[in-house]
Amino acid sequence: MKFLLHADAGADELSISGDDYKYLIKVRRHKAGDLIALRSKENLQDECLYRLEKTDGRNAYFHLENRRNAPCEAGKKLHIGWCLIDPKTIDKTLPMLTELGVSKITFIHCRRSQRNFRLDFERMMRLMESSIMQCGRTSVIELAESQSLSAFLSDHPDAAVLDFGGDALGCGGPINTVVVGCEGGFDESERKLFKNVKSFSLPTVLRSETAAVAVAAALL
């Protein structure tokens, strides 16, 4: 764990109880004198370094030792337009995309996306918060939703689209926005909209979530 999120991070004195107490004291086995980094959701850029003063069996008491601005971000921004897949699969993949440094994900309702899927952004936020505490990133991915691929491409005309037969990913100019298809891929009416098609030099077909992670790893 790189830091712990706490609502009172920044205060001179604070106490921690409940699950966070169990994690720090029972699992991580911190003891009096240890230094622990805390950040608040409202100000993730500031690292607050606390010294553990004492515990009483249910609460841990801390004193602020140091506070500094310490952002931890990817060197560039990447926006993924991700054609909607099963939210359970998104939940499993989101922590990896958080660790890799993706700045924004727009979930697109494309022609072959299943229509009964509903996105729970609050749950996704909790997953990202858990991920940033482990990896040290100091922002969460911005999440958005688009009702069609045509609408997304209209809003982002310079977006690259990951599909078969395109130029190798990485060729040409820098890519800031890339579209990844759903399990069934794109239909022909959608392919007519494409202007900048990219592909991996692989003979295999990637699952949507694998492609999303691979794109992030390749471009970031």
Image (cartoon, rainbow, N blue to C red):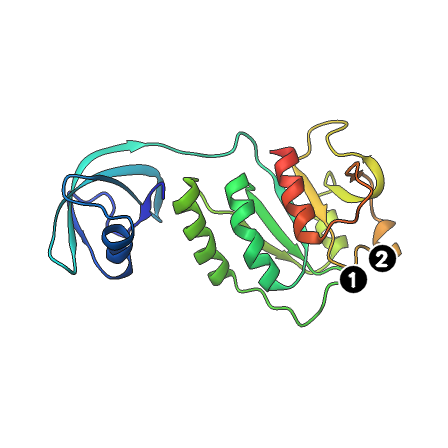
Q: Split into 4 quadrants, where in the image is the C terminus?
A: top right
Image coords of residue 126 (percent x, y) = 43, 57
Which residue is most to the top?
172
Q: Is 100 left or right of 59, judged from the image as shown?
A: right
Image coords of residue 33 (percent x, y) = 15, 39
Image coords of residue 114 (percent x, y) = 72, 68
136 in relation to 89, above or below = above
Q: Is 90 left or right of 21, judged from the image as shown?
A: right
Viewer-nearest residue: 91 or 47: 91
For disc 2, the marked residue is 187
Viewer-nearest residue: 134 or 174: 134
Which residue is found at the position 62% from the left and 43% from the top? 79
Task: State the CA–CA distance, disc 1 to disc 2.
Answer: 7 Å
217 in relation to 13, above or below = above
| Crowd rating for badge 1 (residues with CA inside 10 Å; few <14, some 14–19, many 20+) | some
> Circle 2 — which element?
loop
| Crowd rating for badge 2 (residues with CA inside 10 Å; few <14, some 14–19, many 20+) | few
Q: Quadrant of residue 214?
A: top right
Which residue is found at the position 78% from the left and 62% from the top? 111
Circles 1 and 2 in contact, beta carbons < 8 Å: yes
What kind of residue is marked 2? Answer: Asp
Q: Split into 4 quadrants, where in the image is the N terminus?
A: top left
> Circle 1 — which element?
loop
Which residue is found at the position 73% from the left and 27% from the top? 173
Q: Mark 1 vs mark 2: which is more N-terminal?
A: 1
Mark linked to residue 111:
1
Image coords of residue 27 (percent x, y) = 29, 53
What kind of residue is marked 1? Answer: Arg
Mark linked to residue 73:
none
184 in relation to 201, above or below = below
**Number of numbered discs overlaid on the protein picture:** 2
Q: Is 116 left or right of 14, judged from the image as shown?
A: right
